Amino acid sequence: ETGVTQSPTHLIKTRGQQVTLRCSSQSGHNTVSWYQQALGQGPQFIFQYYREEENGRGNFPPRFSGLQFPNYSSELNVNALELDDSALYLCASSLGGGTYEQYFGPGTRLTVT
Amino acid sequence: AQSVTQLDSQVPVFEEAPVELRCNYSSSVSVYLFWYVQYPNQGLQLLLKYLSGSTLVKGINGFEAEFNKSQTSFHLRKPSVHISDTAEYFCAVSESGFGNEKLTFGTGTRLTIIP
């Protein structure tokens, strides 16, 4: 069974640019959540997708957007990058339906200069 | 809204000694509680969770936690730690009931095992 995978592993972007991060969920999981983990902090919830529909959003501006595809893989897009967007971006997949067991990928480390 | 407070940012412990990592939460609704571990340069791994039932929850790697509703706490314990337990530990809460499984995390406790 393949776990949650994320790509790329590391990324360096310039302020003002746009970035797309990708996540492949664990087999059979229909729910994907994205979290931002700044250095020395706990992860913060960005949003969640359930069967291709957004199912909850945290306190992040609209320039953070996402997609979930029919195979339940997902993308996180960030427009107009700011220096404070530098962080580890974590994707987590789950079966949904109240199982409350999220499986995290290794993350994408984004550095904005 | 929920919030989580992890009272200790760093905890050094000698190998084979017991450890307790403290977690308190605040919420206006019923919550589910979780502990996750993060090893260097890795994602988070679920150690244990409390959804209902017995307030003493056993998890992987010999860890356990006790839910105390009156004190709004969910402290993590291990009777004897090993070098391999060196990692960052995060306590998290989620609003109970069916819905989005958004996790609200604390700021983490770095557990360092001293040989």
Image (spheres, coloured by chain):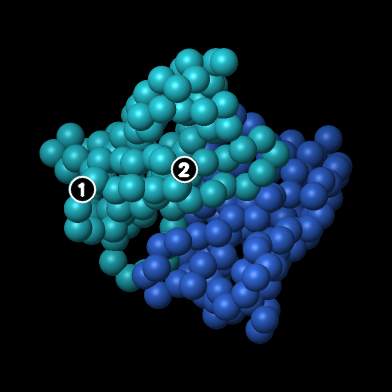
Chain colours: A blue, B cyan
Residue positioned 57% across, 15% down in the render: B115
Side of B13 relative to B98 (left or right):
right
Residue A13, located in which quarter of the rendered image? Answer: top right
How far from the left and from the top, in percent, is residue A92?
A: 58, 59
Q: Chain of mark 2?
A: B
Q: Nearer the viewer, residue B49 or B70?
A: B49
In-image side of B59 versus A53 (left or right): left
Question: Tag 1, which secondary structure?
Answer: loop
Q: Mark 1 Cα within 10 Å, few/some/many (few <14, many 20+)?
A: some
Residue annotated with mark 1: B55
Q: Residues within 10 Å of mark 2 (few under 14, many from 20)?
A: few
Q: Please name the amino acid that badge 2 sits on.
A: Asn
Q: Residue at x 57, y 78 (%)?
A: A28
Tell me the amino acid under the disc marked 1. Thr
- Please indicate whether residue A78 sits to the left or right of residue B8 in the image: right
In the figure, B73 relative to A81: above or below?
Answer: above
A86 to B110, vertically: above or below: below
Q: Position of residue A22 (x, y in %)?
A: 74, 63
Which residue is drawn at the image coordinates 79% and 39% (left, top)?
A: A111
Seen from the viewer's position, the closer of residues B107 and A113 is B107
Residue topped by disc 2: B61
